[in-house]
Structure formats: C-alpha cells, structure tokens
Image: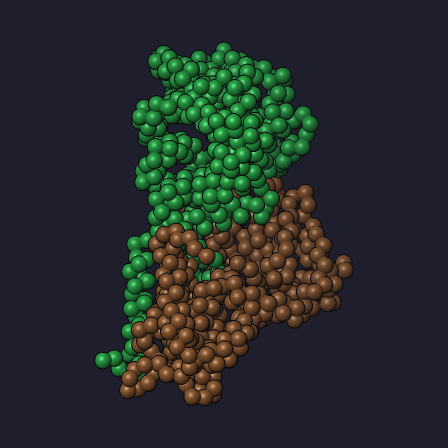
Chain colours: A brown, B green
C-alpha cells in the first residue's frame, strides 16, 4: 500500500505539458471611457462556474450560452478601472462570443467602461482567478496598435497605472493607416498580384491579329487601372470586414495557398491571355481571397469589438494608399515604355512568367508544405 | 481560336478551376488548427468548445469540487486542504495541465508562505515547486523535511528525484539508500536505477532493475514505474530493439503515461521512424511535449501538415513567453535546432536550460547545439559533467567524442 502511494506521487517530474492559466484583456479608448475585450479560458471558467451542466466532460455552445450572464458578471466583478480616483463602471456590451487561442477555447467578454471625465491616466485593478490559481496571469494591453509589451498582472502585482497620452481614436486611425501601408508593402504576394494585373493596362489586344498593341492615350490606360484597382479594393474590403467581424472564417492555409494560386492565374493570363478588358472581374473575384489574408493581420491585434470600426477603416485606407503609391510609380513608367518590344516581351511576358514561377513556389510551400528556399 | 473578348464565362471558368485546384490540393490534409482566431458565435448548440473533467463519471473531480466548497467556507482545515492539494497534483500529472498545480497551491494558501509549515504541506509545496522547475526552493523544503521526519519515505524519494534532475548523483543515491528500509527493496532499486540512468550509467541501471523485478511479485503501479524506468535505461544503453518492446509494454499497461509516450517517441525519432512517431502521438496534440515530437516527425518527412503544426507549436511557445515563463527551454531548444534550423538560438536555449537541469537530454542538447553552432567549446560544461558522472551510455559517448574532435 505504501509503495502504491509512493508511485502515485513520485513520478511527478510533472512535465508541464500545457501553458498555465492566462487571460487576455484588451482596453481601448472610446469617448470618455473605454471599450474592452476580455478572453477568459473556458477551462478556468469551468472550475469556478461549472459550465458543463450535464457533466459529460464537454462544454457545448448551448451550455455556455445559457450561462453567459454569469460569465460576464463573474469576470467584470473582478476588474476595477478608475481614472484620477473616480471609478469607471463596467457593463457587458454584447452577447458572449468564443475565440481560440493556441491552448484552447476562450469566452470573449466584450464590455464598455464609462468614466466620469475624460481620463489622462488609467488605473487597473485586476483580481480574476488569483484566489483559485495563484499562478494565473492577466495579460493586459491598452491601445490598439499591438505594439509594445503588454502588462503582466499577477497575484502579487495586480494593479497598474497606464498613461493614456496618444491613445485618442484619431491617433489609432493614424496607426492603422500606417499599419495598412506597411502591410501592403511587406506583403509581396499582394503586390505581385496587383502588378500582374496592371502590366497589360497600357496595352490592348488587337482584334484581328490577337497581338498586344500599345493603347493610344493615357486616359484609357488610367481608366483600365482605376477599374482593376477599384474592383480589387472593393472585394478585399468586403472580405476583410466580414472576416474581422467573425462572420466568415476560412482556414489560413487555404487562404494563403489560394492567394498564391491567384497570383499564378493573374500572371499566366498575361502570357496566355484569356481576359483582357475584363481583368477587373478577375481582380474582384481574386480580391475576395486577399481580404481574408489581410484579416489575419487584424486578428493578431485581438481588438475589442468596439474599436473595430475605426481600425478596419484605417487599415483599409492604409492598404489603398499603399496600392496607390505603387500605381503612381508604375503607370507613368509603363505608359512611356509601352511601345517598346522590351515592355511587351521582357516585361509583360518575361516578368509575368517570373511572377508565376515565384507564386508556384509559394503555392507548393503553402499548400503542400514543400520547403523551397529562394529570395 | 480564342474568343476575342473574354466573357464572364471565362472569368468564372478560371475562378472555378482555381477553386477546384486548391480544394483538391488541400482535401484530406486535415484541419488547420488556427481557423478561429477571430471571435465567433458558434452556429450550432451542440458545438463542443472545450474538454474538461467529466464530473458525471469522474468521482475524483466530484470529490475535488466538494472539498473546494468545504474549504471555501473555512480555509484552515488542514486535512481537507492536504487531501484536495494531493488530488489536484494527481490530476495535474494525469492531464499535464499546470492549472492543477496552481489550484493545489491555492488549497494550501493558509500555510503556503510559512517558514515552517506542517510536514504534509511542506511535502506538497516541494512537489509543486518541483513541477514548476523551482528546484532550489523545492530542495530547501525537502532537506528540511528529511531532517524533521527522517522516516518519511515520500520525502526521501522526491528528494532523490530532484537531486537526480539537478545532476547531484551521489547525494541522490544517498537519498535512495534511505528509502529502501522505509518503502521496500523494489522502490529502493528503482530509485537507485533512476539515478544511475540519469548519470549516464544505464547498463548498471538495467542490471539493477532486472534483478529487482525478478525478485517476486509487486503492485501494478510499482511494476509499471519499474518497467518505464527500465525502458528508458535500456534505450539510453543503446539496446534499442528491447527498449522499443519495453516502451510498448509500459504504454499498454498505462496509455495515459505521457512521460513514457514522449520518451518512446524520442527513441523512434532517433531510429529514424517518423511515421511511427506520428501514429504514437497524433491524438495527444493538446500536450505540448507530444506536439513537439509530432512536429519533429512531420518536419523530417516534409508532410503537408508540417507548416500548420509548426505554427501552432510556435504560437504556444510565444504564449508562454508572453506570461513570462521560460519553463520550456529544453523543448524550445529542440524546436530551434531541428525545425527552425537556428543553431545560435538553440545553443542559447540549451545553455539557459543547463542552468536549471542536468538530465541526459540536457547534456545531449548542449552537445548537439554547440556542434551545430560550430562552437564546440560551448559544450565544455556538458563534457566535464559526463566525465564527473562516470557516464558510459553509447549515444552520449559518441556525441561527446564528436565534440572533442571538433574542438581540436
């Protein structure tokens, strides 16, 4: 008997096979107060609220939904926000949602905090779960640029004061515009796609010979570019919004592979033309895919629902500005060179072939996990 | 030949073809884990969001809940608190979820910070600290405990284990010697064998265990413990064929033994049998340690699943760092070395890990990372350690020889 108790307690080179308990709290300025999003692990909530009503070991959506008032109430009672000594009462802002972190499912509590005066600094007093698990940590972000280190609150350090200078919605808008520009410039796949669609803009197909000939006036080239870019923009704005609001979700591998495939299609079309003046339709259809790609950038910021509108708009504006900058450089150059064989052969056909090859490598890597190293 | 104007039909055809190609390419590739990073509202009532202990069928889970309620009314009931903390630690080991160690700590809250807590609390406190790799603090408690109550077998055993992990083999062996008269000869022998195997003298450990197992019958759990120690020692001694059989036998006795499963996966990785590794750990992806083995196997094979799994494991490591943990330096070093192919990072992690623990895997990682990084001298501490321990395990010896050659 003694040996049995021994064996049970001994083997405890407890290999810690999971991450310990954390919650993710994100606060953002909104008017005289804040909007907040708080992700709390269902495994932690189960321990304090017993969500698994039938005790079968699985928390279902209906079990969680039935207890959403308890979940919000439990969490919000364990967070105190105040500015200059005056409290900012919290209230749940919308129905409970769910999100996956790398270690499991979390309840998403969206809330608002109404402060009596426009705050200059915010005091946070966090007391969730410390009584149940002293190793719990509250990981708190204030502001929406996703930059900087979050606050890590623990049982021994559960309060913090955060300066709010530079956290106005305008500044947030500016940050998101910047982030959008950055993303379009860093995302080579989006740029190559756009380039592949734009290369033929200064040419048109001759009806008799079927060969590329230069367009006669700048205006018709601009018109074509505007159509293609607008269609692309409209399409990716639609899917970016839908994905960020959680209406649609696609596996990221599918999206990334499909984006690579879209670049192949756009580039090959320049070599073996199927679409000419109707490229805007392809730009629209394939732009829908790219929007899902952009959405992953916003998902990483884990924003409160309340600040999503400004953020989305800002990010979109940034992406458009980034695109326009490319077009502004590309179009005059392409127009000047359009009559030369260099443009038609080397740039249009050769360039497109290179783009298609690069995109094939991406596709192989993203869809089949085949590592190809280049660039 | 071709229509002069491309029709909408053409666009549709292209889009359809594209969609078809992609979905064909991706079908049967399994689900990507990170699809729901954006908050969503589940569409079906029955959607299962999370697995938790089933209170309807799990008597231990019900008992924990009842004890917690009783302690919520009055926290300073020592017997109840000890019982709850013990159950929580047990569940923590079975599930691998460190939350339970935190909950055990919470149950012991009234005594947790005391300089001289009751012996029962001290033992559990040491166990919890050990689980968090806070070895010096755990040892301080265990040393005090064996002074206060020298006939506490559990204290001697836990002390031997912690000292063994730290690489203090002679003192660990002394702890094991104290155990034999208190807990029986098999327990004493397994304890000694574990220390020998940790010191890289696995042939001696094998002989000791085989002899002890041959001496009469034992309890099921005790035997499983002995067998899993034997399996690991056999693998370290280089008798891979026998080790494979032993690991399979231990897992058949107790499929929930995550430690043995990971050790078995490591052996299969060394034997270049990644497909068997995947079959072994595939259904245990919630466990970071098993996921690491799967990632190493999938990456070695270059499977379509590899990128998503690599991303998933990377995200888990990042989430750990965010909260300020550096508990997984050993696993991260292997990830950096074999998946990210970043030898400098792997060496740094192996060195950080070496500060904390000195098990054979820690020795091996320091040697491998130093070699990969072309800085064999960085492995000096591991070489000196092997010499001082009198190690003769063939795998470690061969690796040490390569390091010595490289530094000449």
Residue toward you, B284 or A74:
B284
Residue ID at (37%, 62%): A357
* In-image side of B362 versus A365 (left or right): right
Residue toward you, B108 or A226:
A226
Q: Residue furthest left?
A: B1
Please say if A86 is above or below A102: below
Question: Where does the image place residue B262, in percent across and percent down from the top left?
Answer: 41, 34
Q: Is residue A17 visible?
A: no
* In-image side of A338 versus A322 (left or right): left
Please say if B122 is above or below A32: above
Number of marks in picture: 0
Question: Where does the image place residue A228, in percent across and percent down from the top left?
Answer: 43, 78
Residue ID at (65%, 31%): B111
Residue ID at (41%, 31%): B263
Question: Where does the image place residue B372, in percent across and percent down from the top left?
Answer: 48, 37
* In-image side of A127 versus B380 (left or right): right
């Amino acid at each position: 008997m003694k040996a049995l108790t021994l064996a049970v307690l001994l083997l405890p080179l407890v290999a810690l096979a999971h991450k310990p308990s954390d919650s993710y709290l994100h606060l953002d300025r909104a008017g005289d107060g804040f909007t907040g999003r708080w992700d709390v692990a269902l495994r932690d909530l189960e321990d304090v609220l017993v969500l698994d009503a039938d005790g079968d070991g699985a928390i279902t959506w209906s079990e969680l939904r039935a207890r959403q008032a308890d979940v919000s109430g439990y969490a919000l009672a364990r967070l105190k926000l105040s500015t200059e000594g005056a409290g900012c009462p919290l209230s749940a802002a919308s129905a409970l949602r769910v999100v996956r972190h790398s270690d499991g499912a979390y309840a998403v509590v969206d809330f608002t905090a109404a402060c009596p005066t426009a705050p200059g600094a915010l005091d946070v007093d966090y007391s969730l779960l410390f009584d149940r698990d002293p190793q719990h940590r509250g990981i708190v972000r204030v502001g929406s640029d996703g930059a900087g280190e979050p606050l890590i609150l623990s049982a021994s350090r559960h309060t913090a004061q955060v300066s709010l200078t530079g956290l106005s919605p305008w500044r947030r808008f500016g940050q998101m515009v910047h982030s959008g520009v950055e993303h379009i410039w860093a995302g080579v796949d989006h740029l190559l796609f756009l380039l592949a669609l734009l290369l033929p803009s200064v040419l048109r197909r001759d009806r008799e010979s079927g060969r590329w000939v230069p367009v006669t006036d700048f205006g018709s080239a601009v018109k074509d570019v505007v159509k293609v870019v607008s269609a692309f923009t409209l399409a990716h704005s639609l899917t970016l919004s839908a994905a960020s609001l959680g209406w649609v979700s696609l596996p990221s591998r599918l999206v990334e592979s499909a984006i690579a495939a879209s670049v192949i299609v756009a580039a090959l079309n320049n070599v073996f033309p199927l679409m000419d003046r109707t490229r805007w339709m392809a730009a629209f259809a394939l732009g829908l895919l790219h929007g899902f790609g952009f959405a992953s950038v916003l998902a990483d910021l884990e924003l409160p629902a309340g600040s999503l509108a400004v953020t989305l708009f800002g990010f979109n504006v940034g992406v458009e500005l980034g695109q326009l900058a490319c077009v502004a450089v590309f179009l005059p150059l392409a127009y000047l060179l359009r009559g030369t064989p260099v443009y038609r052969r080397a740039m249009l056909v050769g360039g497109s072939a290179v783009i298609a090859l690069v995109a094939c490598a991406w596709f192989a890597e993203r869809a089949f996990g085949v590592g190809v190293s280049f660039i | 030949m071709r229509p002069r104007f491309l029709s909408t039909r053409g666009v549709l055809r292209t889009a359809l073809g594209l969609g078809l190609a992609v979905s064909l390419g991706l079908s049967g590739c399994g689900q990507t884990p990170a699809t729901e990073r954006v908050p969503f509202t589940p569409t079906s009532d029955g959607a299962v969001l999370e697995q938790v202990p089933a209170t309807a069928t799990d008597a231990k889970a019900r008992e924990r809940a009842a004890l917690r309620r009783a302690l919520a009314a009055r926290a300073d009931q020592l017997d109840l608190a000890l019982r709850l903390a013990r159950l929580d630690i047990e569940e923590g080991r079975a599930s691998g979820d460190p939350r339970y160690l935190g909950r055990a700590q919470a149950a012991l809250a009234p005594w947790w910070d005391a300089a001289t807590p009751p012996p029962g609390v001290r033992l559990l406190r040491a166990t919890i600290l050990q689980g968090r790799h806070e070895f010096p603090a755990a040892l301080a408690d265990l040393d005090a405990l064996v002074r206060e109550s020298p006939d506490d077998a559990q204290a001697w055993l836990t002390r031997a284990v912690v000292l063994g992990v730290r690489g203090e083999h002679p003192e660990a062996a002394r702890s094991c010697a104290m155990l034999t008269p208190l807990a029986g000869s098999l327990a004493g022998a397994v304890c000694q064998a574990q220390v020998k195997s940790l010191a890289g003298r696995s042939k001696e450990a094998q002989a000791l265990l085989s002899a002890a197992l041959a001496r009469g019958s034992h309890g099921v759990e005790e035997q499983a413990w002995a067998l899993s120690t034997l399996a690991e020692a056999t693998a370290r001694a280089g008798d891979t064929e026998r080790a494979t059989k032993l690991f399979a036998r231990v897992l058949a006795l107790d499929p929930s033994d995550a430690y043995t499963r990971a050790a078995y996966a490591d052996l299969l990785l060394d034997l270049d049998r990644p497909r068997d590794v995947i079959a072994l750990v595939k259904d245990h992806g919630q466990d970071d340690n098993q996921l690491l083995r799967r990632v190493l196997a999938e990456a070695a094979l270059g499977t379509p699943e590899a990128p998503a799994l690599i991303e998933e494991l990377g995200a888990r490591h990042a989430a750990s760092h965010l909260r300020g943990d550096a508990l997984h330096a050993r696993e991260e070093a292997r990830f950096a070395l074999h998946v990210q192919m970043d030898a400098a990072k792997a060496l740094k992690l192996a060195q950080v890990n070496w500060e904390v623990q000195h098990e054979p895997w820690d020795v091996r990682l320091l040697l491998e990372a130093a070699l990969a990084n072309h800085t064999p001298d960085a492995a000096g501490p591991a070489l000196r350690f092997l010499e001082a321990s009198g190690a003769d395990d063939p795998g470690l010896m061969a690796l040490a020889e390569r390091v010595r050659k490289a530094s000449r």
